[in-house]
Image: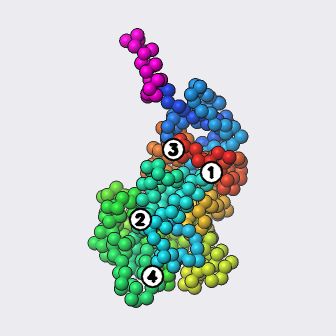
Protein backbone atom coordinates (compact mmCIF):
# COMPACT_ATOMS: atom_id res chain seq x y z
CA UNK A 1 0.00 0.00 0.00
CA UNK A 2 2.95 2.37 0.43
CA UNK A 3 3.24 2.98 -3.32
CA UNK A 4 0.06 5.12 -3.11
CA UNK A 5 1.47 7.47 -0.46
CA UNK A 6 3.19 10.03 -2.69
CA UNK A 7 0.29 10.52 -5.15
CA UNK A 8 -2.16 10.83 -2.25
CA UNK A 9 0.12 13.33 -0.51
CA UNK A 10 0.45 15.41 -3.68
CA UNK A 11 -3.29 15.39 -4.23
CA UNK A 12 -3.94 16.49 -0.66
CA UNK A 13 -1.49 19.37 -0.97
CA UNK A 14 -2.79 20.49 -4.35
CA UNK A 15 -6.44 20.32 -3.37
CA UNK A 16 -5.98 21.75 0.12
CA UNK A 17 -7.26 18.43 1.47
CA UNK A 18 -7.28 17.30 5.08
CA UNK A 19 -3.96 15.46 5.16
CA UNK A 20 -2.19 15.69 8.49
CA UNK A 21 -0.91 19.21 7.80
CA UNK A 22 -3.50 21.36 9.55
CA UNK A 23 -1.79 24.49 10.82
CA UNK A 24 -1.04 24.57 14.53
CA UNK A 25 -0.30 27.58 16.69
CA UNK A 26 2.53 27.39 19.21
CA UNK A 27 2.22 29.78 22.15
CA UNK A 28 5.63 30.31 23.77
CA UNK A 29 4.78 31.20 27.38
CA UNK A 30 7.36 32.80 29.65
CA UNK A 31 5.35 31.58 32.62
CA UNK A 32 2.21 29.44 32.60
CA UNK A 33 -0.07 29.45 35.63
CA UNK A 34 -1.16 25.93 36.50
CA UNK A 35 -4.37 26.83 38.30
CA UNK A 36 -4.73 23.33 39.75
CA UNK A 37 -1.42 23.37 41.62
CA UNK A 38 -1.13 27.14 41.92
CA UNK A 39 2.41 27.00 40.49
CA UNK A 40 3.95 29.17 37.80
CA UNK A 41 5.72 26.98 35.24
CA UNK A 42 8.58 28.61 33.33
CA UNK A 43 9.10 28.32 29.58
CA UNK A 44 6.09 26.34 28.43
CA UNK A 45 4.55 25.84 25.01
CA UNK A 46 0.80 25.57 24.48
CA UNK A 47 0.01 23.91 21.16
CA UNK A 48 -3.32 24.85 19.59
CA UNK A 49 -5.02 23.20 16.65
CA UNK A 50 -8.28 24.72 15.43
CA UNK A 51 -10.24 25.52 18.61
CA UNK A 52 -8.51 23.10 21.01
CA UNK A 53 -5.32 22.75 22.99
CA UNK A 54 -3.60 19.61 21.75
CA UNK A 55 -0.50 19.71 23.96
CA UNK A 56 1.25 21.62 26.74
CA UNK A 57 5.00 21.05 26.67
CA UNK A 58 7.98 22.13 28.73
CA UNK A 59 10.39 24.35 26.82
CA UNK A 60 9.80 26.32 23.65
CA UNK A 61 8.70 23.82 21.03
CA UNK A 62 8.09 24.60 17.38
CA UNK A 63 6.30 22.78 14.62
CA UNK A 64 6.77 22.69 10.90
CA UNK A 65 7.04 25.56 8.41
CA UNK A 66 3.26 25.67 8.04
CA UNK A 67 2.76 26.32 11.78
CA UNK A 68 2.57 29.64 13.59
CA UNK A 69 4.49 30.76 16.68
CA UNK A 70 3.22 33.50 19.01
CA UNK A 71 5.82 34.96 21.34
CA UNK A 72 4.49 35.31 24.89
CA UNK A 73 7.91 34.74 26.43
CA UNK A 74 7.76 37.89 28.57
CA UNK A 75 4.25 37.26 29.81
CA UNK A 76 2.28 35.18 32.32
CA UNK A 77 -0.26 32.92 30.65
CA UNK A 78 -3.42 31.54 32.24
CA UNK A 79 -6.78 30.11 31.16
CA UNK A 80 -9.43 32.39 29.71
CA UNK A 81 -11.46 33.95 32.52
CA UNK A 82 -15.13 33.16 33.21
CA UNK A 83 -17.66 35.64 34.64
CA UNK A 84 -20.68 33.74 35.96
CA UNK A 85 -22.96 36.75 36.36
CA UNK A 86 -23.28 39.43 33.69
CA UNK A 87 -26.09 41.28 31.93
CA UNK A 88 -24.85 42.03 28.43
CA UNK A 89 -28.02 43.88 27.44
CA UNK A 90 -27.58 46.45 30.20
CA UNK A 91 -25.33 49.45 30.67
CA UNK A 92 -25.35 51.71 33.75
CA UNK A 93 -27.23 54.95 33.13
CA UNK A 94 -29.42 57.52 34.80
CA UNK A 95 -31.93 56.63 32.11
CA UNK A 96 -32.09 52.89 32.77
CA UNK A 97 -35.71 52.92 33.93
CA UNK A 98 -36.87 55.07 31.00
CA UNK A 99 -34.98 52.94 28.49
CA UNK A 100 -37.32 50.03 29.21
CA UNK A 101 -39.95 52.03 27.32
CA UNK A 102 -37.82 53.71 24.65
CA UNK A 103 -35.42 51.06 23.34
CA UNK A 104 -36.44 48.55 20.70
CA UNK A 105 -35.03 44.99 20.71
CA UNK A 106 -32.66 45.97 17.88
CA UNK A 107 -31.31 48.86 19.98
CA UNK A 108 -30.72 46.46 22.86
CA UNK A 109 -29.04 43.94 20.55
CA UNK A 110 -26.53 46.43 19.15
CA UNK A 111 -25.61 47.59 22.63
CA UNK A 112 -25.34 44.03 23.91
CA UNK A 113 -22.98 43.05 21.11
CA UNK A 114 -20.71 46.00 21.93
CA UNK A 115 -20.72 45.03 25.59
CA UNK A 116 -19.89 41.45 24.64
CA UNK A 117 -16.85 42.47 22.60
CA UNK A 118 -15.64 44.75 25.40
CA UNK A 119 -15.95 41.83 27.83
CA UNK A 120 -13.99 39.49 25.56
CA UNK A 121 -11.19 42.00 25.10
CA UNK A 122 -10.98 42.28 28.90
CA UNK A 123 -9.96 38.61 29.04
CA UNK A 124 -13.32 37.03 29.81
CA UNK A 125 -13.77 34.37 27.19
CA UNK A 126 -16.90 32.85 28.73
CA UNK A 127 -19.83 34.46 30.57
CA UNK A 128 -23.11 33.43 32.10
CA UNK A 129 -25.77 36.02 31.22
CA UNK A 130 -28.15 36.00 34.18
CA UNK A 131 -31.22 37.60 32.68
CA UNK A 132 -32.35 39.93 29.95
CA UNK A 133 -35.11 40.28 27.41
CA UNK A 134 -34.22 37.27 25.28
CA UNK A 135 -31.77 39.27 23.19
CA UNK A 136 -29.13 37.61 25.39
CA UNK A 137 -30.05 34.20 23.98
CA UNK A 138 -30.01 35.51 20.40
CA UNK A 139 -26.59 37.05 21.04
CA UNK A 140 -25.38 33.70 22.36
CA UNK A 141 -26.44 32.12 19.08
CA UNK A 142 -24.84 34.85 16.96
CA UNK A 143 -21.52 34.49 18.80
CA UNK A 144 -21.61 30.70 18.54
CA UNK A 145 -22.26 30.95 14.79
CA UNK A 146 -19.36 33.36 14.31
CA UNK A 147 -21.60 36.21 13.18
CA UNK A 148 -20.31 38.62 15.84
CA UNK A 149 -17.32 38.50 18.19
CA UNK A 150 -17.89 37.97 21.88
CA UNK A 151 -17.34 35.61 24.78
CA UNK A 152 -18.97 32.21 24.88
CA UNK A 153 -22.39 32.87 26.44
CA UNK A 154 -24.58 30.74 28.68
CA UNK A 155 -27.94 32.49 28.71
CA UNK A 156 -30.69 32.50 31.32
CA UNK A 157 -33.07 34.18 28.88
CA UNK A 158 -35.72 36.04 30.90
CA UNK A 159 -35.29 35.70 34.67
CA UNK A 160 -38.21 34.72 36.90
CA UNK A 161 -39.65 36.26 40.08
CA UNK A 162 -42.97 36.71 41.87
CA UNK A 163 -45.43 39.55 41.36
CA UNK A 164 -43.75 42.65 42.76
CA UNK A 165 -40.43 40.85 42.71
CA UNK A 166 -37.10 41.81 41.20
CA UNK A 167 -38.05 40.79 37.66
CA UNK A 168 -41.56 42.28 37.65
CA UNK A 169 -41.37 44.98 34.95
CA UNK A 170 -44.35 46.83 36.44
CA UNK A 171 -42.66 47.68 39.75
CA UNK A 172 -43.10 51.39 40.38
CA UNK A 173 -45.62 51.97 37.59
CA UNK A 174 -49.12 53.38 37.95
CA UNK A 175 -52.03 51.06 38.66
CA UNK A 176 -53.22 51.62 35.08
CA UNK A 177 -49.90 50.48 33.64
CA UNK A 178 -49.69 47.50 35.98
CA UNK A 179 -53.13 46.33 34.87
CA UNK A 180 -52.39 47.08 31.22
CA UNK A 181 -49.11 45.15 31.11
CA UNK A 182 -50.11 42.41 33.57
CA UNK A 183 -46.99 40.23 33.07
CA UNK A 184 -47.22 36.47 33.55
CA UNK A 185 -44.96 33.42 33.35
CA UNK A 186 -43.93 34.14 29.76
CA UNK A 187 -42.63 37.53 30.90
CA UNK A 188 -40.87 36.10 33.96
CA UNK A 189 -43.55 36.78 36.59
CA UNK A 190 -44.87 33.61 38.22
CA UNK A 191 -46.78 32.85 41.42
CA UNK A 192 -47.50 29.45 42.90
CA UNK A 193 -45.89 26.14 41.95
CA UNK A 194 -47.87 25.65 38.73
CA UNK A 195 -46.99 29.08 37.28
CA UNK A 196 -43.39 28.59 38.40
CA UNK A 197 -43.19 25.33 36.46
CA UNK A 198 -44.75 27.04 33.45
CA UNK A 199 -42.20 29.87 33.61
CA UNK A 200 -39.31 27.40 33.62
CA UNK A 201 -40.74 25.53 30.65
CA UNK A 202 -41.19 28.80 28.80
CA UNK A 203 -37.49 29.64 29.11
CA UNK A 204 -36.55 26.08 28.14
CA UNK A 205 -38.73 26.43 25.04
CA UNK A 206 -36.96 29.69 24.15
CA UNK A 207 -33.55 28.04 24.37
CA UNK A 208 -32.16 29.21 27.73
CA UNK A 209 -29.16 27.33 29.15
CA UNK A 210 -30.08 27.91 32.78
CA UNK A 211 -32.89 29.29 34.89
CA UNK A 212 -32.42 32.50 36.90
CA UNK A 213 -34.86 33.32 39.67
CA UNK A 214 -35.13 35.88 42.46
CA UNK A 215 -36.12 34.60 45.90
CA UNK A 216 -35.86 38.12 47.37
CA UNK A 217 -36.24 41.64 46.06
CA UNK A 218 -33.40 43.54 44.45
CA UNK A 219 -31.56 46.83 44.72
CA UNK A 220 -32.07 48.28 41.25
CA UNK A 221 -35.81 47.70 40.95
CA UNK A 222 -38.45 50.14 42.19
CA UNK A 223 -39.87 47.89 44.89
CA UNK A 224 -39.52 49.25 48.39
CA UNK A 225 -37.48 46.43 49.92
CA UNK A 226 -34.78 44.16 48.54
CA UNK A 227 -34.23 41.91 51.55
CA UNK A 228 -37.51 40.11 52.25
CA UNK A 229 -38.25 36.59 51.02
CA UNK A 230 -40.56 36.65 47.98
CA UNK A 231 -40.90 32.98 47.08
CA UNK A 232 -42.01 30.11 49.28
CA UNK A 233 -39.79 27.07 49.51
CA UNK A 234 -42.52 25.11 47.71
CA UNK A 235 -42.40 27.51 44.76
CA UNK A 236 -38.62 27.37 44.54
CA UNK A 237 -38.66 23.59 44.78
CA UNK A 238 -41.12 23.44 41.86
CA UNK A 239 -38.72 25.58 39.81
CA UNK A 240 -35.67 23.49 40.75
CA UNK A 241 -37.34 20.15 40.06
CA UNK A 242 -38.72 21.29 36.71
CA UNK A 243 -35.39 22.76 35.67
CA UNK A 244 -33.57 19.60 36.76
CA UNK A 245 -35.93 17.47 34.67
CA UNK A 246 -35.01 19.64 31.69
CA UNK A 247 -31.27 19.48 32.40
CA UNK A 248 -30.96 23.10 33.55
CA UNK A 249 -29.25 24.52 36.67
CA UNK A 250 -30.91 27.26 38.71
CA UNK A 251 -29.17 30.50 39.69
CA UNK A 252 -30.93 32.38 42.47
CA UNK A 253 -30.67 36.14 43.01
CA UNK A 254 -31.05 36.69 46.74
CA UNK A 255 -30.04 39.36 49.24
CA UNK A 256 -31.91 38.55 52.46
CA UNK A 257 -31.02 35.56 54.63
CA UNK A 258 -34.47 33.95 54.71
CA UNK A 259 -34.82 33.97 50.93
CA UNK A 260 -31.34 32.47 50.65
CA UNK A 261 -32.10 29.67 53.12
CA UNK A 262 -35.32 28.75 51.35
CA UNK A 263 -33.51 28.61 48.02
CA UNK A 264 -30.64 26.48 49.34
CA UNK A 265 -32.99 24.02 51.01
CA UNK A 266 -34.95 23.80 47.74
CA UNK A 267 -31.78 22.82 45.87
CA UNK A 268 -30.74 25.79 43.74
CA UNK A 269 -27.34 25.51 42.09
CA UNK A 270 -26.02 28.94 43.08
CA UNK A 271 -26.81 31.98 45.18
CA UNK A 272 -26.11 35.27 43.44
CA UNK A 273 -25.13 38.32 45.55
CA UNK A 274 -26.02 36.95 49.01
CA UNK A 275 -25.51 40.38 50.52
CA UNK A 276 -27.17 39.71 53.88
CA UNK A 277 -26.11 36.12 54.50
CA UNK A 278 -26.30 35.27 58.19
CA UNK A 279 -24.36 32.56 60.01
CA UNK A 280 -27.10 29.96 59.55
CA UNK A 281 -27.34 30.63 55.81
CA UNK A 282 -23.55 30.43 55.42
CA UNK A 283 -23.43 27.10 57.21
CA UNK A 284 -26.32 25.79 55.14
CA UNK A 285 -24.57 26.78 51.91
CA UNK A 286 -21.30 25.20 53.01
CA UNK A 287 -23.02 21.96 53.99
CA UNK A 288 -25.12 21.82 50.80
CA UNK A 289 -22.16 22.72 48.58
CA UNK A 290 -24.24 25.48 47.01
CA UNK A 291 -22.15 27.78 44.84
CA UNK A 292 -21.81 31.42 45.87
CA UNK A 293 -21.45 34.07 43.14
CA UNK A 294 -20.81 37.21 45.20
CA UNK A 295 -20.67 40.19 42.72
CA UNK A 296 -18.86 42.45 45.21
CA UNK A 297 -18.15 45.04 42.53
CA UNK A 298 -21.88 45.54 41.92
CA UNK A 299 -22.57 46.24 45.57
CA UNK A 300 -19.67 48.67 45.81
CA UNK A 301 -20.59 50.34 42.53
CA UNK A 302 -24.20 51.16 43.40
CA UNK A 303 -23.29 52.29 46.92
CA UNK A 304 -20.44 54.51 45.66
CA UNK A 305 -22.57 55.97 42.87
CA UNK A 306 -25.31 56.82 45.37
CA UNK A 307 -22.86 58.63 47.64
CA UNK A 308 -20.93 60.43 44.91
CA UNK A 309 -23.79 61.36 42.56
CA UNK A 310 -26.92 62.41 44.48
CA UNK A 311 -30.01 61.98 42.34
CA UNK A 312 -28.44 59.35 40.06
CA UNK A 313 -30.89 56.74 41.37
CA UNK A 314 -34.52 57.27 42.42
CA UNK A 315 -34.79 57.60 46.22
CA UNK A 316 -36.15 54.08 46.75
CA UNK A 317 -33.16 52.57 44.91
CA UNK A 318 -30.64 54.87 46.55
CA UNK A 319 -31.78 53.77 50.02
CA UNK A 320 -31.37 50.09 49.12
CA UNK A 321 -28.01 50.70 47.46
CA UNK A 322 -26.62 52.12 50.68
CA UNK A 323 -28.20 49.59 53.04
CA UNK A 324 -27.55 46.43 51.01
CA UNK A 325 -24.78 47.09 48.48
CA UNK A 326 -22.23 48.29 51.00
CA UNK A 327 -22.42 45.05 53.03
CA UNK A 328 -21.50 42.60 50.28
CA UNK A 329 -17.72 42.53 50.66
CA UNK A 330 -17.82 41.86 54.40
CA UNK A 331 -20.42 39.13 53.87
CA UNK A 332 -18.17 37.50 51.29
CA UNK A 333 -15.28 37.54 53.76
CA UNK A 334 -17.35 35.65 56.33
CA UNK A 335 -18.55 33.12 53.77
CA UNK A 336 -15.10 32.11 52.54
CA UNK A 337 -13.89 31.55 56.10
CA UNK A 338 -16.60 28.90 56.45
CA UNK A 339 -15.66 27.10 53.24
CA UNK A 340 -18.50 28.18 50.98
CA UNK A 341 -17.67 27.34 47.35
CA UNK A 342 -17.16 30.50 45.28
CA UNK A 343 -17.51 31.03 41.54
CA UNK A 344 -16.53 34.38 40.05
CA UNK A 345 -19.29 36.78 39.04
CA UNK A 346 -19.63 40.54 38.88
CA UNK A 347 -23.12 41.64 37.74
CA UNK A 348 -21.56 43.54 34.82
CA UNK A 349 -24.18 45.87 33.42
CA UNK A 350 -24.77 47.30 36.90
CA UNK A 351 -21.30 48.80 36.44
CA UNK A 352 -19.38 49.44 33.20
CA UNK A 353 -18.56 46.38 31.10
CA UNK A 354 -14.89 45.55 30.72
CA UNK A 355 -14.05 46.35 34.34
CA UNK A 356 -14.91 42.82 35.47
CA UNK A 357 -11.42 42.08 36.82
CA UNK A 358 -11.84 44.69 39.57
CA UNK A 359 -13.69 41.93 41.40
CA UNK A 360 -10.41 40.06 41.96
CA UNK A 361 -9.05 42.94 44.00
CA UNK A 362 -12.18 43.14 46.14
CA UNK A 363 -12.04 39.39 46.74
CA UNK A 364 -8.44 39.50 47.92
CA UNK A 365 -9.15 42.55 50.10
CA UNK A 366 -11.76 40.41 51.87
CA UNK A 367 -9.21 37.71 52.61
CA UNK A 368 -9.20 35.36 49.61
CA UNK A 369 -5.68 34.41 48.41
CA UNK A 370 -4.95 35.51 44.82
CA UNK A 371 -4.73 31.94 43.51
CA UNK A 372 -8.15 31.15 44.98
CA UNK A 373 -9.62 34.26 43.38
CA UNK A 374 -8.19 33.16 40.03
CA UNK A 375 -9.51 29.63 40.55
CA UNK A 376 -12.96 31.08 41.16
CA UNK A 377 -12.88 32.47 37.59
CA UNK A 378 -11.34 29.35 36.03
CA UNK A 379 -11.64 25.94 37.72
CA UNK A 380 -14.62 26.82 39.92
CA UNK A 381 -16.53 28.73 37.28
CA UNK A 382 -16.08 25.85 34.84
CA UNK A 383 -17.45 23.49 37.47
CA UNK A 384 -20.48 25.70 38.05
CA UNK A 385 -21.13 25.68 34.30
CA UNK A 386 -20.63 21.89 34.23
CA UNK A 387 -17.91 22.49 31.62
CA UNK A 388 -14.77 21.16 33.30
CA UNK A 389 -14.15 18.95 30.25
CA UNK A 390 -13.79 22.07 28.09
CA UNK A 391 -12.93 25.07 30.24
CA UNK A 392 -11.00 26.25 33.28
CA UNK A 393 -7.44 24.98 32.72
CA UNK A 394 -4.73 24.97 30.06
CA UNK A 395 -4.60 21.26 29.31
CA UNK A 396 -4.73 19.05 26.24
CA UNK A 397 -8.28 18.57 25.05
CA UNK A 398 -9.62 21.83 26.50
CA UNK A 399 -10.90 24.70 24.40
CA UNK A 400 -8.08 27.07 23.50
CA UNK A 401 -9.13 29.98 25.72
CA UNK A 402 -5.92 31.74 26.74
CA UNK A 403 -5.09 35.04 28.43
CA UNK A 404 -1.63 36.57 28.88
CA UNK A 405 -0.57 39.33 31.26
CA UNK A 406 2.51 41.51 31.48
CA UNK A 407 2.87 40.84 35.20
CA UNK A 408 2.41 38.12 37.81
CA UNK A 409 -1.17 38.03 39.15
CA UNK A 410 -0.11 36.02 42.19
CA UNK A 411 1.98 38.99 43.28
CA UNK A 412 -0.18 41.79 41.84
CA UNK A 413 -3.81 40.83 41.26
CA UNK A 414 -4.46 44.11 39.42
CA UNK A 415 -2.49 42.81 36.41
CA UNK A 416 -5.68 40.91 35.52
CA UNK A 417 -7.20 44.27 34.64
CA UNK A 418 -4.96 44.64 31.60
CA UNK A 419 -4.59 41.48 29.51
CA UNK A 420 -2.14 41.91 26.67
CA UNK A 421 -3.22 38.76 24.83
CA UNK A 422 -6.64 37.14 24.53
CA UNK A 423 -7.41 33.98 22.56
CA UNK A 424 -10.84 32.35 22.49
CA UNK A 425 -11.30 28.93 20.88
CA UNK A 426 -8.02 29.32 19.01
CA UNK A 427 -8.76 32.78 17.59
CA UNK A 428 -6.73 35.77 18.75
CA UNK A 429 -8.71 38.89 19.70
CA UNK A 430 -6.02 40.87 21.56
CA UNK A 431 -2.25 40.80 21.09
CA UNK A 432 -0.57 43.97 22.26
Local SS, label 3:
loop
**Image vertical order of residue 222 relative to residue 114, above or below:** below
Q: How far across and down, in percent of the image, does residue 368 sit?
A: 63, 58
User: Which residue carries the number 4 mark?
Assistant: 171
Which badge, 2 or 4, is on the more N-terminal residue? 2
Secondary structure type for disc 2 = loop
**Count of numbered labels shown in the rendering:** 4
Tag 1 and tag 3, C-beta contact below 8 Å: no
Residue at left offset 45%, top offset 44%? 389
Is residue 328 toward the left or the right of residue 52 in the image? right
Residue 199 included in the magenta stretch of the image: no
**Mark 4 neighbour class, 10 Å CA radius: few under 14, some 14 to 19, many 20 or more:** some
Proximity of marks 1 and 2: CB atoms separated by less than 8 Å: no
| Residue farthest toward the front in the current orientation of the protein | 14
Rendered image: mark on residue 425? 3
Residue 418 spot, x, y in % from top left: 67, 53
Examine the rendering and report whether any part of residue 72 can be seen: yes
Towards the viewer: 353 or 286: 353
Q: Earlier in the sequence, mark 4 or mark 1?
A: 4
Amino acid sequence: MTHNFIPCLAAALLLGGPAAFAQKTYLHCGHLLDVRSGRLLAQQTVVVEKDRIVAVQAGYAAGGPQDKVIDLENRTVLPGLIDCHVHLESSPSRNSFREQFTLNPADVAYRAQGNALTTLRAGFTTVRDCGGSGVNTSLRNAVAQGLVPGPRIYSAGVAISATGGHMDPTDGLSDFMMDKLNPGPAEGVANGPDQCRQAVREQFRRGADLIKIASTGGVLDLSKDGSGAQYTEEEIRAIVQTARDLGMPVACHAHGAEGIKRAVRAGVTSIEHGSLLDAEAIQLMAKSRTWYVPTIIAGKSVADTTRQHPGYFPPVIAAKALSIGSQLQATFGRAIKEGVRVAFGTDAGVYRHGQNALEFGYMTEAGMPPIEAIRSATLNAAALLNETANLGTLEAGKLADVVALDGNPLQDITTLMHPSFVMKAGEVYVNK
